[in-house]
Amino acid sequence: MDRHRVPVLEEAFEAFYEATVGRTYAAIYRVAGGDEFLARDAVQEAYLALWKLWPDRGCRAIEDNRRYVQKIAVHKILDVYRTRWWQVEFDNDLAVPDADTVFDEILDELSVWALVRQLLSRQPPRR
């Protein structure tokens, strides 16, 4: 890349960044469900990815590049959610109860219902 062209690219990217980062962050913050740190990381990584492509994309319209950055940031958030899904830790609350305990509870409930039916059958008919 030409040394004289680098400052022009940097200035153009800096102007683009300053013009779009607020709106991009606001949209990504909503996508991240209010997670400020996740939104900041995603936006930062998205602008870095665009910076690497800036020599080719810098000539495009600002709105096209802003949407491009936003799409990258959304995908970064989705990647994080996919990774977090695999890292879910299960606790003892989700443990399977002992089979004997389950059978005892069912038998107790059936016994109560049998007793209720027996008491109802002894009642005199309504007039």
Image: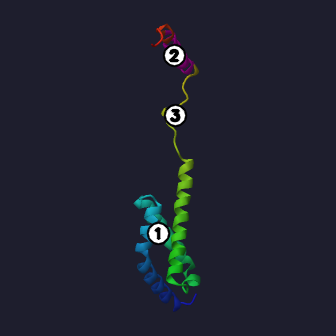
The Cα atoms of the two marked residues, 3 and 2, are separated by 29 Å
Q: Residue furthest bottom?
A: 4
Q: Please name the residue shown 51% across and 18% down the image.
A: 109
Label 3 vs label 2, nearer the camera: 2
Q: Which residue is mark 3?
A: 94
Give how far across and how far down residue 87 sits, in percent.
54, 47
Name the residue type under label 2: Trp
Q: Which residue is mark 2?
A: 113
Give the secondary structure at mark 2: helix
**Residue 37 image-quadrant placement:** bottom left
- 36 vs 113, left or right, is left
Q: Which mark is residue 125?
A: none
Q: Are marks 2 and 1 in contact (CB under 8 Å)?
A: no
Give how far across and how far down residue 46 sits, in percent.
51, 70
Magenta extent? 100-118
Which is nearer the N-term, disc 1 or disc 3?
Answer: 1
Count neighbours of disc 1 (C-alpha within 10 A) and say few if under 14, some if 14 to 19, many if 20 or more: some
Q: Please name the residue shown 55% across and 64% down the image.
A: 75
Q: Is residue 43 above or below residue 125?
A: below
Q: Which residue is mark 1?
A: 44
**Residue 52 image-quadrant placement:** bottom right
Give the secondary structure at mark 3: helix
Count neighbours of disc 3 (C-alpha within 10 A) and say few if under 14, some if 14 to 19, many if 20 or more: few
Secondary structure mostly taken by the magenta-highlighted segment of the chain: helix
